Amino acid sequence: AQTVTQSQPEMSVQEAETVTLSCTYDTSESDYYLFWYKQPPSRQMILVIRQEAYKQQNATENRFSVNFQKAAKSFSLKISDSQLGDAAMYFCAYIDLYSGGGADGLTFGKGTHLIIQP
Amino acid sequence: KAGVTQTPRYLIKTRGQQVTLSCSPISGHRSVSWYQQTPGQGLQFLFEYFSETQRNKGNFPGRFSGRQFSNSRSEMNVSTLELGDSALYLCASSLEGSNNEQFFGPGTRLTVL
């Protein structure tokens, strides 16, 4: 079974600074997707960024970028120019591309609580 | 397009009762997945439905079941509720399968007393 580990239960950053959230995963598969989801106090899960394992280029979405190291099974999220609205729980998630005709659903890490200091 | 909707948003039940939660996916999405979120266990995959068929199931007891209708709307049912079933239940929809980008609903907060 796949596992996703987020080793930082909580991180704090000053507004406008840069912060990096860590994520490692374990899988024997070669084709998969990785995601970072954001869950603000409203509890609505919002997709932040997505990375296909077959792509070597790191995904970027505006102020959000990832450092995907496939051999090391590492997938960190960098948030640049942190804003107050970035405060939330951030979850790293993994999904197989192929598993018995369908996928087994997202496997989530335990999450990192990101605090933005004004 | 309207997002994923879940009803009800909040629910209080007592042990031994059963409950049905509903999820309406984004129009055109055929896959619906359900997740349970608790402080202790985090986010766990319950099951996925695609074209009215359960395609995958997570490691949950048989008390947890679901179904999907021809319009892709999905329901999940929990029978003989236990205190440990108190959780936020999230539904997510995607176009073709759960390995595509999943869009989440706001969740149903279930409290079992």
Image (tube, rainbow, N blue to C red):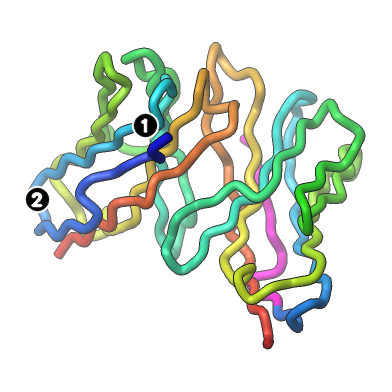
* Mark 2 Cα shell of 10 Å, populated few (<14), some (14-19), many (≥20): some
Vertically, is A10 above or below B41? below
Write down the region rendered in magenta: A1-11
- Element at badge 1? loop
Frontmost residue, B88 versus A87: A87
Quarter of the figure with residue A53:
top right
The residue positioned farthest toward the front in the image shown: B1
Residue A107: in magenta span:
no
Residue depicted at x 81% and y 52%? A65
Q: Chain of mark 2?
A: B
Q: Which residue is mark 1?
A: B25
Residue depicted at x 71% and y 64%? A7
- Identify the image quadrant of the C terminus of chain B: bottom left
Frontmost residue, A73 versus A57: A57
Vertically, is A71 above or below B39? above
Indicate the amino acid at tag 2: Gly
Q: Which residue is mark 2?
A: B16
Indicate the amino acid at tag 1: Pro
Q: Are marks 1 and 2 in contact (CB under 8 Å)?
A: no
Query: Mark 1 to mark 2: distance in Å?
Result: 29 Å
Please check whether the numbered discs 1 and 2 fall on a single chain: yes
